[in-house]
Image (cartoon, grey):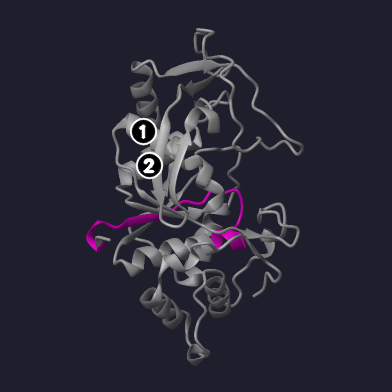
């Protein structure tokens, strides 16, 4: 891996404080960048105003600072990048790759959108005139085959039409979609490596397709194992994750490193958080996470 070329990032959504699963991802991303003498950037993915919560961004920054995870350069906020997303939409629209869709978003109990649902193409041939606030904009993906190599999961090959269907890039509630925003922001920042949770792996083929269409580079991806609660459900801000505070940074770092298969040795029992991070950077190997499945969280303290 070319250390000079490495540029990573952490891009949390400010829908609440960082839960334990997010802290694990942040640390893995940070260590992977620092172990290769690379940059580590911080972006707040607040493109969706309906998910953003007042004060959450500041909480996220304080959590990272408490753990000693220092980022390079200024924090980027997606809410300030709307012109970039519109330019991307215009580029795709000029190539006749988008169409208006008035289908309702699939919803499950609790009001959350159904994740990774396959869209059947209902509106693809309707030839509707797009009206903002009444229609979403979808990207025609046809039978595109996407191939790639995840640093942890290995090679993958996905039929995008069968896996996801036509992707929403602009929502009916007048919000630019995650797929479009993250691809354009990663490209603008020169991101070369992305370390993120396995729950985002299904989004990767669609993002690679967008990268190809927009003529931007595809980063190297690594999707880390998830942390789950005792019932087997992914940690979320509606469950135990709210209690993942950082009252004792040294102990929290040890806990996170245990989950990342890098247990801190006994001779560092009295080490400072700076010493623990230094040790972790020197010994970091993301390959230790190969084949590791979801990990159950039984203790949210310290």
In the rendered image, the quadrant that contains the N terminus is bottom left
Task: State the SS at label 1.
Answer: helix
Looking at the image, is mark 2 or mark 1 earlier in the sequence? Answer: 1
Q: Position of residue 302 (x, y in %)?
A: 64, 75
Question: Is 17 a magenta residue?
Answer: yes
Q: Is residue 244 left or right of residue 200?
A: right
Q: In which quarter of the view is residue 287 placed?
A: bottom left
| Residue 36 visible in the displayed image | yes
Q: Position of residue 156 (x, y in %)?
A: 45, 44
Q: Position of residue 157 (x, y in %)?
A: 44, 40
Residue at the spot x=36%, y=77% of the render?
A: 282
- Above-or-below relation of 76 to 113: below
Q: Are marks 2 and 1 in contact (CB under 8 Å)?
A: yes
Number of the label disc, if any, that sits on residue 84: 1
| Number of numbered discs on residues | 2
Number of the label disc, if any, that sits on residue 185: 2
Residue at the spot x=51%, y=46% of the render?
A: 201
Residue bounds of the magenta highlight = 3-23
- Above-or-below relation of 20 to 214: below
């Amino acid at each position: 891996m070319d250390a000079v070329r490495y540029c990573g990032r952490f891009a949390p959504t400010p829908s609440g404080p960082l839960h334990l699963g997010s802290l694990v991802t942040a640390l893995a991303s940070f260590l992977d960048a620092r172990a290769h003498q690379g940059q580590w950037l911080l972006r707040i993915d607040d493109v969706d105003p309906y998910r953003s919560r007042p004060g959450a961004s500041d909480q996220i920054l304080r959590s990272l600072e408490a753990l000693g995870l220092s980022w390079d350069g200024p924090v980027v906020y997606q809410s300030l990048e709307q012109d970039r997303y519109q330019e991307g939409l215009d580029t795709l629209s000029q190539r006749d790759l988008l169409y208006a869709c008035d289908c309702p978003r699939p919803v499950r109990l609790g009001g959350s959108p159904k994740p990774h649902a396959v869209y059947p193409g209902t509106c693809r041939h309707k030839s509707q005139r797009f009206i903002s606030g009444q229609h979403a904009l979808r990207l025609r993906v046809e039978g595109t085959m996407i191939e790639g190599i995840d640093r942890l999961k290995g090679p993958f090959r996905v039929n995008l039409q069968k896996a996801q269907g036509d992707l929403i890039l602009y929502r009916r509630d007048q919000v630019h979609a995650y797929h479009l925003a993250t691809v354009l922001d990663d490209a603008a920042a020169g991101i070369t490596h992305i370390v993120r949770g396995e729950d985002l792996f299904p989004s990767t083929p669609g993002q690679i397709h967008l990268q190809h269409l927009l003529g931007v580079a595809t980063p190297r991806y690594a999707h880390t194992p998830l942390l789950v609660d005792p019932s087997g459900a992914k940690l979320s801000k509606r469950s135990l994750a709210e209690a993942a505070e950082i009252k004792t940074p040294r102990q929290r770092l040890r806990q996170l490193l245990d989950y990342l298969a890098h247990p801190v040795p006994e001779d560092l029992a009295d080490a400072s958080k700076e010493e623990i991070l230094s040790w972790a950077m020197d010994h970091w190997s993301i390959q230790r996470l190969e084949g590791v499945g979801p990990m159950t969280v039984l203790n949210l303290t310290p």
